[in-house]
Every structure is written in structure tokens, then in C-alpha cells.
Amino acid sequence: MITATKVEALLRRGVVMPCPASVEVGAEVEPERIAPGVVIHTGCKILGARTSIGPGSELGAEAPATIEDCQLGQKVALKGGYFSGATFLDGANMGSGAYVRPGTLLEEEACAAHSVGFKQTILFPFVTAGSLINFCDALMAGGTSRKDHSEIGSSYIHFNFTPHQDKATPSMIGDVPGGVMLDRAPIFLGGEGGLAGPVRIAYGTVIPAGIICRQDIAEEGTLYVPPSSPESRAFRPGAYRSIDRIVGNNLTYIGNVRALQAWYTHVRKLSMARDRYDAACHRGALVRIDSILDERIERLGELSERMTRSIELARTDATHRLPVELIAQQQALLDRWPEIESRLRSTPPVDLGANDRDAFLQAWRKAIDGRSHTDAIASLAPDVRQAGSRWLQSIVDSVSSIWTASPRPANT
């Protein structure tokens, strides 16, 4: 239900609407969650009881914008499009034609130009996306400032759906333990290219324009040159080969999201307490992280279910026979999934990396005094950042080791 009284309440609060008669505000929206001075342009829709819009933000400057259950920090600009179930921290911005779905988190000054699609997407501070991009189910970090940032070139795609019709495909461009410290080399994904998930890309990587990357890049500072195309071979949906890297990358991704959850719980909580809009963004970010964890565990579970059919095909279809080692990999995922799922849904022990965590937090409480989050990070001594990264890496390792420690034949 849309109510004119909510528009009137926002105007009384000092929200700026050049054409208030064209703006729709849901009856469930709480006016006090929208800061005085926010600018809402012609044709915009504000929906959702969890919507919160911080000071200096602007909606619909280029085209009408629909905001549904989103949280915006200070000076966020969403210039046109559809935004649902997403959180945008200070200075984040997106051009018109955006299509942003739940599970999206853009941190400080992360931005995108026009016609960009995000879903279950995490961009760390300063990460920049061009135009005409579909970048779902991915986390990207890297860079140190607005002038030294990771880049997604225009017309870029993260391919997150396989010919087997599964979506156990999250890709990690950078990581959480290093990325949150804002001191790692930026990553460059050249335009008119793509990543075929799930892949892991190291800091300092350059993937030139026009290239599809289908493999992990583990060495930092790499200019990627794709290998020659393999010879054609028979393909049948549901007949998997080695799954070792797929499962390993999924667990590493989940481990990094768990580390980000701990970061928001212990660190961001202290630097996002400026006002009610900050607090709403903090809560919103944790909701996004929870939804990403649920999604990734569910998708990995769906992959495990597919192993029954894959093993059957490997044993009965002569064109899809596999070495016993690869069948054992698939059987291990199928057999161990209930145990793996239980561990993935459990929060990592609170004492993981406790000494490094406590040392970091002691310095952090001093660093945030009067500083923005990014400025506070920049003020930390190298040894403090290293302690923080070790703490977060211990969380990642506790999750990724679930699969590497499994009793199965080695990958071939």
C-alpha cells in the first residue's frame, strides 16, 4: 500500500523531493529511517520496513529508482534502477539501469556505472565496475584508495551457471583477510571478458580485455595468458569429472564469508556506530552475509546430490568412464555431505586466532577515534594489520580444511 501521508512526513523531515507527487513511499516505510536532506528524484519508489537512507544520499538522479529493504550510508548515490535487499556503505554509488538483488554489499566508495547487475555480490572499498556488467555470486577486494582500486571492465560477466545446471560457482577475486586491510595490490579484470566460476584470483592479477578466465590464478602480480584450448571431448549433463577444485573453492569462499562475518561482528561494529543510519547499515551487512552463507551452503548441497547420477554415469556410460580416484572424490562428497553441512552451518570457534584478534582490536579502538573506517584502517601499523589478517585467515582455514582433511584418494 502506498500512502501520501508518508510522502508528507518525509517532506516535513526535510527530505528533498523536486516532484513529490511522483514519489511512492510504502506504508511500511518508517520516515525517521530516512535522513533530512536526502534527495529523492521524480518517479522513485521507497519500499520495505528495513529501508534506511543516510545523510547526503541521493536517489534517481539519472532515472527512476526503486529501493526495497536496502540500507544506505552517507552520501550514497543510486542513480536509477532496481535495488532490493542490498546494503551500500558511505560513498557507494551506481549508475542508472542497475539491477541489484538480495545479498549484495558495496562497501565504502565501491561503485558501478550504468546497466550493472549484482546479486550475492560483495565489493570491498573502492572496487569499481564499468558498464554493462553481470557480476553475481562473487567477492572482490584489492586496492588502497579511490585512485588505486580494483577494476571490473565494461561488458564483463561472472559466469555462475554451469552446463550441468548447478550454481556451486562463487568466485573470489582477492580475499577477506588481506582485502579488509586495504593494503593489497589492485586486480584488473579487462572489459569484454569473464570469469567462469568458481575461481580464485590473486592480488595484482591483470586479465587483459576480451579474455575468459577459467582457472585459478594463485601467484600475485600475474599477467594472465590463457592456455590453449583443450581438445573436444564428449559432454553429458550430470557427468562430472574432478570436483576437488570446485569443492575446495566453495569451502574457501564460505570460509572467507565467515571471516567477513567475524570482521563485521567485532571490528565494523565499532566503526559503524556513528548514528542510527550507520547502525542500520551494520545490521544490514550482517543480514547480507547470513544470506550469502545460506545460499552457498545450499548450492554446495545441491552439487553433492548430483554426485549420485554422476557416479552412475561414470560406471555405466562408456563415453564418461572415470579413474577410480575421481569416482572416489565424488563419493566422498556424497557420503560426507551431512557432516560437512553441519560444520559449515556452525559458527567457527570464538577462540580461533584470539590472541591476534585481541591485539588487533586493542589498536583498533584507538584508531577509530574521530576517523572514518577507511582512514582508520590506513592509520594502522603494519604489524597490527598482519595480526588482524592472521586472525581472519585462521577462520578461513578452519572452514577450507573440512574438505582437504577428508579421507579420500588424492586428486589426479
Image (cartoon, rainbow, N blue to C red):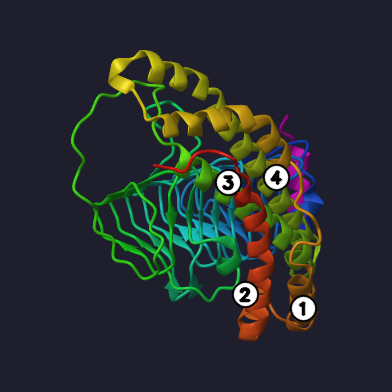
The Cα atoms of the two marked residues, 2 and 3, are separated by 28 Å
Q: Secondary structure at mark 4?
A: helix
User: Closer to us: mark 2 or mark 3?
Assistant: 3
Q: Earlier in the sequence, mark 1 or mark 2?
A: 1
The residue under label 2 is 374
Q: Amino acid at mark 3?
A: Leu
Q: Earlier in the sequence, mark 2 or mark 3?
A: 3
Q: Amino acid at mark 4?
A: Asp
The residue under label 3 is 251
Eyeballing the image, is 237 above or below 103?
A: above
Q: Amino acid at mark 1?
A: Ala
The Cα atoms of the two marked residues, 2 and 4, are separated by 24 Å
Tell me where residue 229 sits by quadrant. top left
Q: Secondary structure at mark 2?
A: helix
The one of 362 and 13 positioned closer to us in this rendering: 362
| 234 horizontally vs 267: left or right | left
Q: Earlier in the sequence, mark 4 or mark 1?
A: 4
User: Closer to us: mark 3 or mark 4?
Assistant: 3
Of the 4 image quadrants, the one containing the C terminus is top left
Rendered residue at 63%/32% (across/down): 336
Estimate the x, y position of residue 291 in percent, counting from the top left.
67, 41
| 239 horizontally vs 16: left or right | left
The residue under label 1 is 359
Eyeballing the image, is 145 above or below 84?
A: below
Span shown in magenta: 1-12
User: Closer to us: mark 2 or mark 4?
Assistant: 4
The residue under label 4 is 290
The Cα atoms of the two marked residues, 3 and 1, are separated by 27 Å
